[in-house]
Image: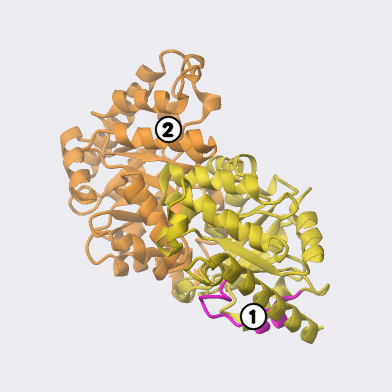
Chain colours: A yellow, B orange
Amino acid sequence: MGFVEKFRGIRDKNQSMVCVGLDPDLDRMPDHVKAAADPIFAFLNEIVSATADLVCCYKPNFAFFGSSGRAGWESLEALTRSIPDDIPILLDFKAGDIGNTAVHYARMAYEKLQADAVTVNPLMGKDAVDPFLTYADRCCFLLCLTSNSSSSDFQRLETNDGLLYQVVARKAVEWSSGSQCGLVVGATHPGELGEIRRIAPSLPFLVPGVGSQGGDAGEVVQNGLDSTGSGLLINASRSILYASDGEDFVQAARQATIDLKAQLNVAAEQAA
Amino acid sequence: MGFVEKFRGIRDKNQSMVCVGLDPDLDRMPDHVKAAADPIFAFLNEIVSATADLVCCYKPNFAFFGSSGRAGWESLEALTRSIPDDIPILLDFKAGDIGNTAVHYARMAYEKLQADAVTVNPLMGKDAVDPFLTYADRCCFLLCLTSNSSSSDFQRLETNDGLLYQVVARKAVEWSSGSQCGLVVGATHPGELGEIRRIAPSLPFLVPGVGSQGGDAGEVVQNGLDSTGSGLLINASRSILYASDGEDFVQAARQATIDLKAQLNVAAEQAA
């Protein structure tokens, strides 16, 4: 099943726009989990079990596995195998390289790690994105306007073709003959989210930044929904994973996900 | 020893500007190597042994390891341990993410994989680069004007502050209080290489694209050298690794490296 079908199916089943970002940080895990043979997997497997009926996607963040070396890679492989088949996996590695290299990043994500979607940095242009587009049933989310404050260093530069993030959004529409592209737009820019939605009315948006980074969930929903009332994967990582650093971390993560899901659904009803 | 010292030491010892890109592609390796227990390591270890007296740097390309999954990660770890200590390792992963994630990419490169330098995609701005800069004795090469033809999609956009790649070059100078930044400038843009050298007179440049991608080595040297007659790491990957697909691949790789080294040194003498 392709990304779009998987996403729609689980979104409808779970009635959720919540994407849980899986950023395993050993320094923030409860002590009893750190003692496990594979603490990263043990921690995330608990998180997945506790939230699988509440989410529309899981987003493993490659850096947090890579920083543990080979052990981290093994944890990531185990994790991707353990996520239920009907929930899409979005591998967040923000890859971007010349064609013959991008082919290998696509193979890593889609063939070795069972991802349904990826994040891609578009700075190198179309030939760096093409190898991802050849997997027609997957989705590559291009960085458009990211949630961090330094996003303005380059992404907001005024070009002869509009602001840089607007150029990226238009290119994503142009390159996406079907539904192979999505966009990453930070929750910390709610006004621009609406503007980007008008440029790309039917692309899915991955929206990080509602949790620890302070973006307003209601504003994101109001501005970001597409005309069918969908098209948003709203990501929270730290605010769910580390809702508690005690033995109750599983319940705390579940409760944080329930709360975010409800907040988003209320906002969607108000926006409808 | 920091990146700059290592680079200068081996450049002087080997009298070379050649950086060998390590892009292990199982489909292009000789049959007898494919039969090894760890073919990626076996292949690259031969390449390193045959070229260690001819290069100024090795650049493992993460994608080509990642596409082999866990086995590829193990090969990469073995490779980084086997590269002689006096030759810098530049991990090419073109990472770029928000600060708390970039910390983990830096840890992956510098602590788990013994890299001396990395490539970083600057699109997300300074806070995505900062975690790399905190390793003051390493070097992060920011993508400035890449060798691929689609680099013009975004990197050549005219902004209110100059062409985008010029803005990146100026930011790299601004962010590099010591020598923590370098720039990636494709050999396929020799004219712009000279212009970027004027913007960033003392930063090291990683210059891919002289081999299979068709950049002219002589022009690169003429336009890219700094005022001390140095500052260039000129990368070739496929044209060295796959100079022959037969049992003579080691000799062929060595000869291709000797030829490129000589070509570059002749051009440098002419430019002096």
Q: Chain of mark 2?
A: B
Residue beneath the point at 58% across and 63% down: A21
Residue B212 horizontal side relative to residue A12, left or right: left
Query: Viewed as shown, does residue A25 lie left or right of A79?
Result: left
Q: Residues within 10 Å of mark 1 (few under 14, many from 20)?
A: many
Residue A59 visible in the displayed image:
yes
Q: Amino acid at mark 1?
A: Ala
The residue closer to the viewer here, A245 or B225, is A245
| Residue B198 % position (x, y) | 30, 61
Give, as a single range, the part of the protein colored magenta: A208-225
Q: Is residue B252 above or below residue A30?
A: above
Q: CA distance from mark 2 to mark 1?
A: 43 Å
Residue B53, position as x, y percentages in the image = 23, 28
**Above or below: residue A216 compared with residue A207:** below
Residue plotted at (71% across, 70% down): A17
| In the image, residue A214 lies in the stretch drawn in magenta | yes
Q: Which residue is mark 2?
A: B75
On residue A217, which mark appears? 1
Of residue A202 and residue A138, the one placed in the foreground of this image is: A138
- Residue at the image position 42 percent from the left and 58 percent from the top: A26
Secondary structure state at the residue bearing disc 1: helix
Q: Quadrant of residue A225?
A: bottom right
| Relative side of B49 to A77, left or right | left
Q: Which image quadrant for residue A81?
A: top right
| Crowding near the residue tagged with mark 2, few <14, some 14–19, many ≥20 C-alpha atoms within 10 Å | many
Report if residue B213 is visible in the image: no
The correct choice, above or below, for A78 with respect to A160 in the image is above
Q: Amino acid at mark 2?
A: Ser
Q: Is residue A45 magenta?
A: no
